[in-house]
Image: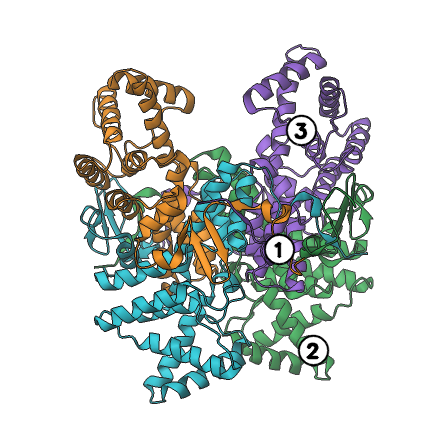
Chain colours: A orange, B cyan, C purple, D green
Amino acid sequence: MSAGPDTTNDVADWWRTAIIDMEPGRIAFRGHPVEELIGTVSFPQMIWLLVMGRVPGEGEARLLEAALVAAVDHGPQAPSIAAARMAVTCGLALNNAMASAVNFLGDVHGGAGEQAVELYAGIARRRDEGAALETAVAETLDGWRAAHGAFVPGFGHRFHKPTDPRAPRLLALVDEAAAQGVVGGGFAAIGRAVEARLRAEKGKPVPMNIDGATAVIYAELGCPPPLARGLFCLSRSVGILAHAWEQMQQGGRNKGPTPPGYRWTYDGP
Amino acid sequence: MSAGPDTTNDVADWWRTAIIDMEPGRIAFRGHPVEELIGTVSFPQMIWLLVMGRVPGEGEARLLEAALVAAVDHGPQAPSIAAARMAVTCGLALNNAMASAVNFLGDVHGGAGEQAVELYAGIARRRDEGAALETAVAETLDGWRAAHGAFVPGFGHRFHKPTDPRAPRLLALVDEAAAQGVVGGGFAAIGRAVEARLRAEKGKPVPMNIDGATAVIYAELGCPPPLARGLFCLSRSVGILAHAWEQMQQGGRNKGPTPPGYRWTYDGP
Amino acid sequence: MSAGPDTTNDVADWWRTAIIDMEPGRIAFRGHPVEELIGTVSFPQMIWLLVMGRVPGEGEARLLEAALVAAVDHGPQAPSIAAARMAVTCGLALNNAMASAVNFLGDVHGGAGEQAVELYAGIARRRDEGAALETAVAETLDGWRAAHGAFVPGFGHRFHKPTDPRAPRLLALVDEAAAQGVVGGGFAAIGRAVEARLRAEKGKPVPMNIDGATAVIYAELGCPPPLARGLFCLSRSVGILAHAWEQMQQGGRNKGPTPPGYRWTYDGP
Amino acid sequence: MSAGPDTTNDVADWWRTAIIDMEPGRIAFRGHPVEELIGTVSFPQMIWLLVMGRVPGEGEARLLEAALVAAVDHGPQAPSIAAARMAVTCGLALNNAMASAVNFLGDVHGGAGEQAVELYAGIARRRDEGAALETAVAETLDGWRAAHGAFVPGFGHRFHKPTDPRAPRLLALVDEAAAQGVVGGGFAAIGRAVEARLRAEKGKPVPMNIDGATAVIYAELGCPPPLARGLFCLSRSVGILAHAWEQMQQGGRNKGPTPPGYRWTYDGP
């Protein structure tokens, strides 16, 4: 009988994980001792190992890295970034400011990538069941809009007109990777087919935006939809941290959204 | 007279940043168009560009990457990781689970790296003013403990005995980088001198842990103390995401900290 | 021309509210000067004024107060309470600990009251369209389960067997208020009819729990479903604060969910 | 030997509380069965019972209620309120919006009440040690400013000039309660003495604001400083909820701090 607690009982079993194993002096991530990973795998490779369970090849990691680099920030007009900056002027430490801001990346602010992966996956299913790509796109889009409304995630941008500068660059990297056999390229084709369909429907371009382009990458890499949002949160956390830190250096106390003189419009009794 | 709002007034000026400039179709981070960064810089380089203002060289980026890789996770017994897993069973999306968990990385759970950078900086100041390294270490340690209590951030580990496996590997990478002239190596010397001093004081090893080792890297790279915590938050967000996602796949509803049968001990009236 | 900013433009109009009007030295909530409310209205009346737009009568306020009192806490096994306690041991201030914990009150942990109000409202609609109450209950329940799964919000409790002690007391207060004409009582009847239907279906009691009972109150008071969750968050914030504060007095550093010796079960490669 | 888990071991003991005791069908708060509290104690009494450990008398509860009523909201220019509104337009549920907003109530935005209680307590200590009130005020103020900078928590207001309308009303209620022997009145005297001292120093009024006045109440009631912030968080959560809910009804997607046309001022390379 050991004097210590029984660590193989219902208590120890209450939390189970395949991510990390630990003993005093030993940490292993999915079977890899941490000291063999440090200095050996890149940060994107480590991210993939933890969330997806395997060290990705360099070509895959390069695509993931491009998606992570592309989405870091969209400026203080984005609610999450504004939140991070305001939080710091309320006296919060960086971890708390980051938390409040990452919390903002909900369905509307942070969900378009996840939704675009779902949309692409739906198209792929129809295509895999035998439909022509154009038919699969048209039918899936119609079903999507019937279920979720007119907004098609991943296409069009209320600010970046005519084109979101991040999307073509990301898509070019996917094309390169597909040419090298790193990924299949099927989701790039699906994304472009959606773009073509929307253009035909509207009679004008509705170009793929960053969410549509990173969704192509995540779909090519086999990433489930919710993780697309999670990875976006990792990426945007970088901009959130940068703005929080910049605001900390600028100072300011209790900064509201607009200069104090403007206040707000009261429309009550 | 323009029909649009005057964008060069007090309102536009209320939020100022050197991080990002934007016009329709154009995004630039600290002067670099985003499409020139995507596929060109690594994720750690992008992180450094945003928070520190410049693209770091490859040697520096390699050290930063090692620090980011090393700190991703410490398992479900860490309060932040447990929080992420419990949050998911309460019905939260990944962004909300990540937010609740990153919030936990306060002074006690996420502050040791920041504090160690401060401690090292204090030693460096004394040394730069002419003190011998050993004297600078002894005096700064005494001052630290007089101000903050007996706990010396970055050294010793309540679980990893005798040694935190991440620290020696990180320090070896700093030594390599110093040998190549990438960094000066002065903070590695300071960290080791603190370790030696603590060993002498206690009569047994109090080895540098991951916080002490990443603090050496951040200090070598010129990173201000609060950013060391911010960068730790970026790194630990990876493990937080991985555990939240794993828990989402496992399922479970309203999982409390221990199996339900144990409840808690009531010690009230 | 005024020297100050034009406060009647698109900037001031960006945020609009009927809740609060303000000038230097003057604050009014929905038309009531704050100094006339302080010491005059109760806290529950103030809550209702702010969220619903009017000062409720004393009878209504008494019901609201009972719902707020009933839901303050369910102990450290509840994930939100555990989160608050763990957060404090990570070095967080009370506002940050409360934030992390309130965040946990998602669909699964904090949504049952909201869902029960929706369920009751669906039954009321069918009944108002002419269906007998039993038919309305049976059809709405079937529709609910077809859409959302087998779990019926507001009924049954995995711990409090045979009865959640809060529910009968809350329902008795609704009955009193209905007898006095404060509320109509129709939703109490609906709640009881759901209970009867579930008992008939299962052949054993599935008693109304606190969520089902507070939902009766909120529905009687005319509260839209999402607000039912919001009001629950106000109530549970009390327990969250109490536990966070108690933990702060107990001390502890980085308390994980279980005693450290247990760790977790690793089931990976 | 029972087949169930041993609930009197180190695991059950890991979380200890005097706040709540529970068995199936039974919940008691600090020894009071919940069904005896519902409909009997007011919400402020329940708050005090949970955080302070006893049901306060009606006179005390009336003061607490006034403090809770007074601080519910300060409009969308307050960073926490703006955060709640923006969060909702990002797709967050009310619990998540409330969390992000309550998180903002840090040292600068939510800490003045806590700090004022500390300041008053310091004055009371000196007075209790024999100093005249004026001397105790002058010395404590000087010590406070030496330690914390020029800002004196609880006095002056950057917007409400000449007077914060909430403070005189709150102080009048404290005077009434003191006249009735509900509280001692010593902290009201201290608050007024601070006000007098600041006026003498500046040669113009620096009137007590809401934080200074609620701090008088909390100090009269024997509330430790950190709890003053916690209670403020409960109070402000009401306004946060009201604004989040109003914004949800108004709609809007990804609302940034200012109208989109204004963006921000870029001052980088």
Do marks 1 and 2 share a subunit? no
Q: Secondary structure at mark 1?
A: helix
- Mark 3: which amino acid? Ala
Q: Is A75 or C106 nearer to us in this picture?
A: C106
Q: Earlier in the sequence, mark 1 or mark 3?
A: 1
Instruction: For mark 3, name the chain.
Output: C
Alpha carbon separation for disc pair 1 and 3: 33 Å
The residue tagged 2 is D125
- Which mark is in front, 1 or 2? 1
Query: Is residue A243 positioned above or below C19 on the image?
Result: below
CB under 8 Å between discs 1 and 3: no
Side (left or right) of D48 relative to C14: right
The residue tagged 1 is C85
The residue tagged 3 is C219
Q: Is B205 or B211 nearer to us in this picture?
A: B205
- Mark 2: which amino acid? Arg
Mark 2 is surrounded, within 10 Å at the Cα level, by few (under 14), some (14 to 19) or many (20 or more) other residues, namely few
Query: Is residue C114 positioned above or below D208 on the image?
Result: above
Give the x, y percent position of residue B16: 31, 56
Q: Quadrant of the C terminus of chain C?
A: top left
Instruction: For mark 1, name the chain.
Output: C
Give the x, y percent position of residue B145: 52, 79
Residue, x 48% and y 52% (percent of image)?
A: A21
Residue, x 28% and y 31% (percent of image)?
A: A155
Q: Is B154 or A148 nearer to us in this picture?
A: B154
